[in-house]
């Protein structure tokens, strides 16, 4: 029997997941080798990514393919803005800047959001399902490393207040992927776009790694 679409998309991106997870920047960040400034810079990049994911969301909510994935409990932009106020101060908007790799990533999301709803789903999956999973590991490390209050300012991005049961939510999300209203060829294109999304994330990590080399132990 053919694997379900959710299994296909997960399996297809497995290798790149490992690459993202074990990137130098992520390893250094989670290994405690970087200062809070690197974490703040990373959070800034996430703000540009989620602005691209969430700006056109009302229009996508009515789309037959992307619409079912648009869930208000996932929205991260307000949380990122609270975190940035904490990390950079109330004037953070005046100094925030996208790395070139982040600008490329955000532009690709916007292009999909505008012209290709199924491609947007690939980007949606890559970020939100990841945040609900590995994001919790990152939050835990960040709280311990830089002393943020548990689930408080600084790590609110990782806290989905309105998702009561993340495991159940992810199951439901995979059900939505399996029920996506596109043909087989389009599914292959979505899988390919998912790989693009992972590569774009890895590109941001690479750029951050260059900006923040770990302090030798
Ligand atoms: C250090 C960083 C990371 C850690 C520790 C991590 C860890 C994990 C873990 C443990 C899961 C499994 C959850 C489950 O089986 O339900 C997972 C799933 C996932 N992660 Fe990550 N992850 C990291 C980085 C990333 C990045 C950078 C992305 C992409 C932007 C990503 C995207 C995903 C996605 C899409 C899933 C869901 C897979 C599926 O069930 O279909 N992760 N992650």
Image (cartoon, rainbow, N blue to C red):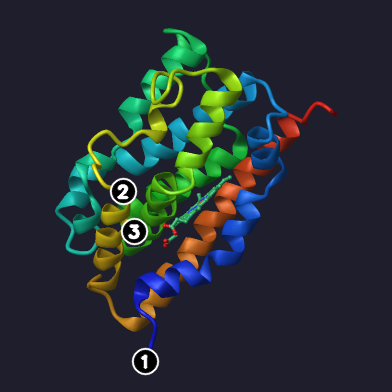
Q: Which class describes the residues within 10 Å of circle 2: few (<14), some (14-19), or many (20+)? A: some
Query: Would you place residue 139 above or below residue 9 in this image?
Result: above
Q: Which residue is mark 1?
A: 1
Query: Would you place residue 40 above or below residue 162 in this image?
Result: above
Residue found 23% across the figure and 64% down from its top: 65
Marks 3 and 2, Cα distance to the nearest angstrom?
Answer: 19 Å
Q: Quadrant of residue 123?
A: bottom left
The mark closer to the camera, 1 or 2, is 2
Q: Of 118 and 146, which appears nearest the observer?
A: 146
The mark tally for this picture is 3
Numbered circle sitting on residue 121: 3
Give percent across and percent down for residue 15: 61, 65
Residue found 37% across the figure and 19% down from its top: 82
Q: Is residue 2 left or right of residue 99?
A: left
The mark closer to the camera, 3 or 2, is 2
Q: Which class describes the residues within 10 Å of circle 1: few (<14), some (14-19), or many (20+)? A: few
Q: Which residue is mark 2?
A: 166
Marks 1 and 3, Cα distance to the nearest angstrom?
Answer: 24 Å
Identify the mark nearer the N-term, 3 or 2.
3
Identify the mark nearer the N-term, 1 or 3.
1
Q: Quadrant of residue 52?
A: top left
Q: Quadrant of the N terminus?
A: bottom left
Q: Quadrant of the C terminus?
A: top right
Residue found 40% across the figure and 68% down from its top: 190
Is the C-beta of the residue carrying label 3 under 8 Å from the nearest atom of ligand 1? no
Give percent across and percent down for residue 202: 62, 49
Marks 1 and 2, Cα distance to the nearest angstrom?
Answer: 28 Å
């Amino acid at each position: 029997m053919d694997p379900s679409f959710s299994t296909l998309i997960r399996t297809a991106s497995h290798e790149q997941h490992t690459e993202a997870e074990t990137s130098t920047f992520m390893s250094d960040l989670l290994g405690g080798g970087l200062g809070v400034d690197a974490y703040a810079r990373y959070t800034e990049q996430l703000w540009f990514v989620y602005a691209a994911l969430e700006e056109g969301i009302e229009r996508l909510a009515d789309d037959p393919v992307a619409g079912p994935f648009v869930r208000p409990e996932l929205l991260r932009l307000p949380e990122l803005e609270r975190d940035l106020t904490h990390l950079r101060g109330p004037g953070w908007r005046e100094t925030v800047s996208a790395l070139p790799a982040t600008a490329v990533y955000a532009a690709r999301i916007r292009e999909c959001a505008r012209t290709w709803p199924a491609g947007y789903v690939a980007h949606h999956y890559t970020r939100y399902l990841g945040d609900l999973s590995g994001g919790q590991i990152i939050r835990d490390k960040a709280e311990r490393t830089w002393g943020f209050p548990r689930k408080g300012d600084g790590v609110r991005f990782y806290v989905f207040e309105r998702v009561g049961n993340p495991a159940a939510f992810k199951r439901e999300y995979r059900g939505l992927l399996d029920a996506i209203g596109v043909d087989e060829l389009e599914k292959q294109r979505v899988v390919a776009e998912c790989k693009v999304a992972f590569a774009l994330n890895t590109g941001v990590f690479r750029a951050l790694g260059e900006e923040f080399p770990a302090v030798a132990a």
